[in-house]
Amino acid sequence: MILSDKSILEEIEKGTIKVVPFNQDALGSNSYDVHLGKTLAKYKDAVLDAKKHNTIEYFEIPADGYVLEPNEFYLGVTAEYTETHAHVPFLEGKSSTGRLGIDIHATAGKGDVGFCGNWTLEISVKVPVRIYAGMPIGQLIYFPVEGVVENSYDKKRNAKYSGQPDRPIESMMWKNQF
């Protein structure tokens, strides 16, 4: 089951879902639209190593936009800070974004109960496309959880992405033991 617009608003009232800033116009019939933040990042190294802390370089999207190029990988961020304490949030692209050839996540579309922060976007494009800070980039949908969550993400000792700021965060795979 997916929460409806009315249910999302009820959960915001209860404090189990938080979206800052919240804009009523961004609320769809069963989703909430999120927008592209002003900061993008790219990895410094051409070859990434899963066991290494791969660092990134940040840059701001100018007022006249920024052209994303195919065969490049960008990290973006949502303008909205979110918290989800009783539901599983899923971040999906909007159809308008997809029709421009923009993919907003490679594999990380599902959040965890207890995720608190801005969402890092894993952006790639099929064709060159100019993007702008503040443009609608995706939508959050919320699924109720069956049963009691004993270990929410914000309480996990090894949660690598809790409290993400309003700028993209690089992969923390290197913190895993393998």
Image (spheres, helix red, strand yellow):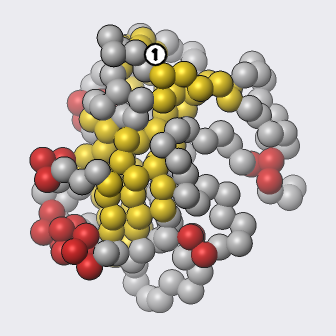
Residue 93 seen? no
Above or below residue 153? Residue 54 is above
Residue at image coords 49%, 70%: 114
Q: Reply above or below: 115 against 147.
A: above
The local crowd at label 1, few if under 14, some if 14 to 19, many if 20 or more residues have their Cα within 10 Å, is: some
Give the secondary structure at mark 1: strand
Residue 5 lies left or right of residue 136; in this view the side is left
Residue position marked by numbered label 1 in the rendering:
68
Task: Give the answer, above or below, for where 49 lies relative to 67.
Answer: below
Q: How many marks?
A: 1
x, y (%) of residue 141? 30, 58
Task: Evaluate whether residue 132 shows in this view.
Answer: yes
Is residue 113 positioned above or below 94 on the image? below
Quadrant placement of the N terminus:
bottom left
Q: Position of residue 69 (x, y in %)?
A: 49, 12
Q: Amino acid at mark 1?
A: Leu
